[in-house]
Amino acid sequence: MSNRESTPKFPESYIGDKAVEYDNSTWMERNQKKTTLLCLQYLRDDKLDNLGNYNVLDGNRYIIVDLGCGSGFSSEILVDSGHRVIGIDILIDMLSKAKTKKKISENKKNLELILADINYLPLRSASINHIISISAYNFIIYGTETIRDKFKAVNNTAMYLKKVLKRKGRIIIEFYPKEDNELELFTSSFNNNGFDGFMIKKNPAQKAGQTYLLLKKR
Ligand SMILES: C[S@@+](CC[C@H](N)C(=O)[O-])C[C@H]1O[C@@H](n2cnc3c(N)ncnc32)[C@H](O)[C@@H]1O
């Protein structure tokens, strides 16, 4: 999610006054919610059904993890669409905003909010139907310096995501890789760790920038 004025930076764009500004922005709320609705459509994408082992999704109520749930715009849409949601975020300044909104939500029993790192998720094996992540996944390599460390972080996380998903589990990620190499790093981490999938971009010629990954467990 590119802010209208500048590209957001982790963690400074999501701490203190910046977290308040984020949560109060109606533009941001609209943008995050619209993207979440699109991700819910992508979850049932025909091309994804036909990829690898052909399968279509059963039912329409799932346990969905929202990775990097921030102040809760995306989780709210997932819950309002009938799903049980586990929202995970590493920053208390953002997660506390989601917690405040949860208190007054009619669907609060369907939302669990956990302070945790996407790279070290406190989730049981085969306990989750699907995973969605909006404008957060590119930050999982924050703090890594060498290519080797980045490679290790993205691959360990992809491996773990496969483990926590049930059979027919899918992942839809909207994120902002900085350049071709970074995009390749993320896509190969899923290809190498048990996922089939493909990406969608508004402008296919452009490698960096807003990208959707549509993935399903092999
Ligand atoms: C653009 S914001 C959240 C967007 C969210 N979809 C929403 O609706 O508000 C990105 C979030 O990713 C979180 N994040 C970044 N790295 C993370 C990590 N390693 N583990 C968990 N959350 C992370 C940040 O704390 C931030 O709240």
Image: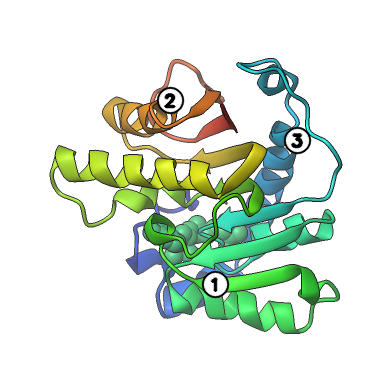
SS category of the residue bearing label 3? helix
Left or right: 25 in relation to 12: right
Measured in 3D between alpha carbons, the distance from the residue under mark 3 to the one under mark 1, in whole angstroms, is 25 Å
Where is residue 8? Give x, y as percent: 40, 55
Residue lying at 54% horizontally and 41% vertically, measured from the top left: 174
Q: Which residue is mark 2?
A: 191
The first of marks 2 and 1 along the sequence is: 1
Q: How is the image coloured?
A: rainbow
Relative to residue 18, is residue 108 drawn left or right? right
Q: Which mark is residue 41?
A: 3
- Residue 73 horizontal/vertical position (percent): 66, 62
Mark toward the start of the polypeptide (3 vs 2): 3
Residue type at numbered disc 3: Gln
Query: In this rendering, which labeled residue sits more in front, label 3 or label 1?
Result: 1
SS at mark 1 in the image: strand
Label of residue 114 in the image: 1
Residue 54 percent across, percent down from the top left: 70, 17
Identify the residue at image location x=29%, y=47%.
Answer: 153
Above or below residue 145? Residue 207 is above
CB contact under 8 Å: marks 2 and 1: no
Cα gap from disc 2 to disc 1, whole angstroms: 28 Å
In the figure, is residue 127 to the left or right of 151? right
Q: Quadrant of the C terminus?
A: top right
Give neighbour class at mark 1: few <14, some 14-19, many 20+ (Cα, 10 Å): some
Residue type beneath disc 2? Asn
